[in-house]
């Protein structure tokens, strides 16, 4: 049975049980689930059912469930919790999770949570919080296992046995000197296969994976994806080992980026909560709809300049949407390709003009092909070869413009600090609509006007 289907079935089962008042049974079943599954059920439930489910979550599970929730849903639950409850929920979280959790809390709670930590964990947390949230330093885990290069494998193994439990996703022991300068890694596999008397220095790996604490989380995700890492050491600017990043953190980044891309295309970048209050959702969407209305008015103003031509040739009104639509689709294809390239770090000064030239050729070839098809269709449809020629020429012009701005617009937006995924689509649609209408009606007014 697919995992997604089982989640839907769980949601239906819990909803039915809550409606029938079987709360004791719901509590037992709910707390038997993984924290991520509990979070999924809470996020997927309407507000009233959400509150009931949250009240049934055991205290020992609250912290892990909260960290799995989206920021907006988490904030709505935390605001109804007493300060002591929030502190209790946070105390058992891993340092990297706790750092994420703190950044979503009201400022008045942060000092209280810091005060509840022992000195070592407080220092670890402050190390993570010193870096921006969207960098390697901001997402790293400071719970790491280190060893000196001059000890034997047997010494390292005895040290690990004393720990009794290793941090999750531990595949390497990090080798540092007495000043915590990073020297290399000792894979766990080496510990299991080398002779106990072997010295760490002789078998450790000194080249390979390291990550700068200032590296963006997107770049980190790309490295993990390309190199199939399970974990990697994080170094500061002085080559000091400050933490590690594990694959589970990277999966979260990849998921967030995918969701961001989907939501941004519809202008819903901030709308994380499926059941957010109607007023809040309406206000967020109103901004995007208002922006779209202004761009539509601009396109309408262009059309209004050619009302006499439209009154004379009704065929133009019938064919006009085709030119804008073809330009919009072509532009979106290029925009999506380039926006993805920017996100993956594939576009730079050295290749942007090559990409631009390539897209111009793609736009020209597709423009000529489909302009020829539409020109012939229009000719036979309205028995006027000039109408066919006009729409063909307008389509070629609009597809060339769409390809050009599909490359240049996201690059420009990225340079000025605006998310191309969020703003690029509306801007490009406006450009292709205005240019399409202007080219089609302008050519028609010149060649068809009596």
Image: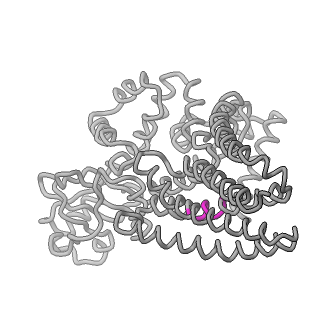
Q: Residue at x 23, y 72 (%)?
A: 205
Tell me, yes or no, if residue 33 can be seen here.
no
Q: In terms of depth relative to the viewer, which is nearer, 214 or 323?
A: 323
- Residue 154 on image: x %, y %: 21, 68
Residue at the front extreme of this rendering: 450
Q: Quadrant of the N terminus?
A: bottom right
Q: In terms of depth relative to the viewer, which is nearer, 115 or 370?
A: 370
- Residue 418 on image: x %, y %: 47, 45
Would residue 331 be counted in the magenta stretch?
A: yes
Tell me, yes or no, if residue 93 can be seen here.
yes
Q: How are the colours assigned in the image?
A: one colour
Q: In the figure, 448 relative to 82: above or below?
A: below
Q: In terms of depth relative to the viewer, which is nearer, 269 or 88?
A: 269
- Residue 334 on image: x %, y %: 56, 64
Which picture quadrant has residue 113?
top left
Would residue 28 be counted in the magenta stretch?
A: no
150 on left or right of 424: left
449 on left or right of 338: right
Q: Residue at x 39, y 69 (%)?
A: 351
In this picture, which residue range is highlighted in magenta? 328-334
Q: Residue at x 76, y 72 (%)?
A: 375
Q: In the figure, 25 relative to 76: above or below?
A: below
């Amino acid at each position: 049975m697919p995992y997604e289907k089982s989640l839907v079935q769980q949601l239906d089962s819990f909803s039915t049980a809550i409606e029938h008042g079987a709360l004791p049974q719901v509590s037992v079943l709910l707390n038997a689930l993984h924290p991520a599954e509990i979070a999924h059920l809470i996020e997927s439930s309407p507000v009233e059912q959400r509150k009931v489910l949250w009240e049934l979550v055991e205290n020992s599970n609250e912290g892990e469930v909260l960290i799995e929730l989206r920021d907006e849903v988490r904030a709505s639950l935390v605001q109804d919790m007493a300060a002591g409850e929030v502190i209790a929920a946070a105390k058992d979280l891993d340092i990297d999770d706790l750092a994420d959790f703190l950044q979503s809390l009201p400022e008045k709670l942060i000092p209280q949570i810091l005060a509840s930590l022992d000195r070592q964990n407080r220092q670890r947390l402050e190390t993570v919080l010193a870096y921006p949230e969207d960098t390697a330093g901001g997402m790293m885990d400071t719970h790491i296992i280190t060893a000196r290069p001059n000890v034997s494998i047997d010494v390292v193994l005895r040290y690990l046995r004393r720990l009794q439990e290793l941090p999750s996703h531990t595949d390497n022991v990090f080798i540092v000197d007495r000043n915590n300068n990073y020297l290399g890694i000792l894979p766990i596999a080496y510990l299991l296969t080398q002779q106990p008397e072997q010295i760490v220095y002789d078998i450790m790996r000194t080249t390979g994976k390291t990550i700068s604490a200032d590296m963006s989380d997107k770049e980190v995700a790309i490295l993990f994806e390309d190199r199939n890492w399970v974990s990697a050491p994080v170094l500061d600017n002085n080559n000091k080992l400050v933490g590690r990043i594990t694959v589970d953190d990277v999966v979260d980044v990849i998921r967030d980026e995918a969701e961001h891309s989907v939501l941004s295309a519809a202008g819903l970048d901030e709308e994380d909560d499926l059941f957010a209050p109607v007023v809040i959702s309406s206000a967020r969407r109103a901004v995007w709809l208002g922006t779209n209305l202004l761009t539509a008015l601009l396109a309408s103003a262009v059309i209004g300049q050619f009302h006499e031509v439209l009154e004379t040739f009704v065929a133009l009104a019938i064919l006009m949407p085709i030119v804008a639509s073809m330009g919009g689709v072509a532009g979106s294809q290029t925009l999506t390709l380039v926006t993805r390239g920017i996100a993956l770090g594939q576009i730079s000064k050295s290749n942007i003009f090559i990409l631009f030239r390539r897209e111009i050729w793609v736009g020209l070839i597709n423009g000529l092909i489909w302009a020829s098809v539409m020109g012939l269709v229009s000719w036979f449809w309205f028995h006027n070869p000039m109408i066919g020629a006009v729409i063909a020429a307008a389509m070629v012009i609009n597809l060339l413009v769409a390809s050009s701005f599909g490359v240049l617009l996201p690059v420009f937006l990225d340079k000025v600090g605006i998310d191309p995924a969020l703003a690029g689509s509306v801007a490009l649609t406006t450009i292709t609509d205005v240019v399409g209408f202007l080219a089609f009606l302008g050519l028609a007014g010149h060649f068809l006007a009596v």
